[in-house]
Amino acid sequence: MSDTIQWFQYKPGLVGETQRVTHCTRITVGDRIRSWCRREFDVSAVEEAAEPGAEPGPGQVAPCGPCVPCLLLATAATEQSPAQPPARAALAVGHP
Ligand SMILES: [Zn+2]
């Protein structure tokens, strides 16, 4: 089972640009994609995007602005990455 987080967003022209935020998911059920912010999307209405802040890979498009709930959940899920110190640990400093 892949541990990769998939980022996706509405294809251009389907919704207003303000609604074209990049969500992340690990769950695809039939032709529905469920994002971590608990919204459902039709797979035909969305396109695979690169992780926000990353260069698009093969088959990926440049991401729109990230969905904040999805971004926070993804950050928490990848918190063990040495490149990104956990925010929780930083907050704990000075609070014994
Ligand atoms: Zn989202």
Image (cartoon, rainbow, N blue to C red):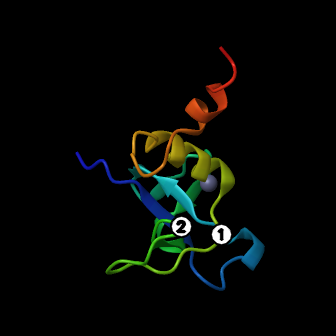
Q: Nearer the viewer, residue 34 or 3?
A: 3
Looking at the rendered structure, the secondary structure element under dot 1 is loop
* Image point (77%, 72%), residue name: 18
Image location of residue 10, percent across then percent down: 59, 72
Image location of residue 94, percent across then percent down: 69, 23
Farthest residue, direction left: 1
Pointer 1 residue: 65
Farthest residue, direction front: 94
* Residues at circles 1 and 2 in contact by the CB criterion of under 8 Å: yes
Image location of residue 88, percent across then percent down: 59, 32
* Image point (67%, 72%), residue name: 20
Q: Give the answer, above or below, for where 94 lies relative to 45.
A: above
Pointer 2 residue: 52
Q: Is mark 1 within 8 Å of ligand 1?
A: no
Image location of residue 57, percent across then percent down: 35, 77
Identify the mark at residue 75; answer none if there is no mark.
none
- For label 2, count other residues whose C-alpha is less than 10 Å away and answer few (under 14), some (14-19) or many (20+): some
Can residue 16 be seen in the rendering of this structure? no
* Image point (59%, 51%), residue name: 70
Of mark 1 and mark 2, the one earlier in the sequence is 2
Identify which amino acid the numbered label 1 is placed on.
Gly
* Image point (52%, 47%), residue name: 75
Q: Give the answer, above or below, for where 38 lies relative to 54.
A: above
Quadrant hosting ligand 1: bottom right
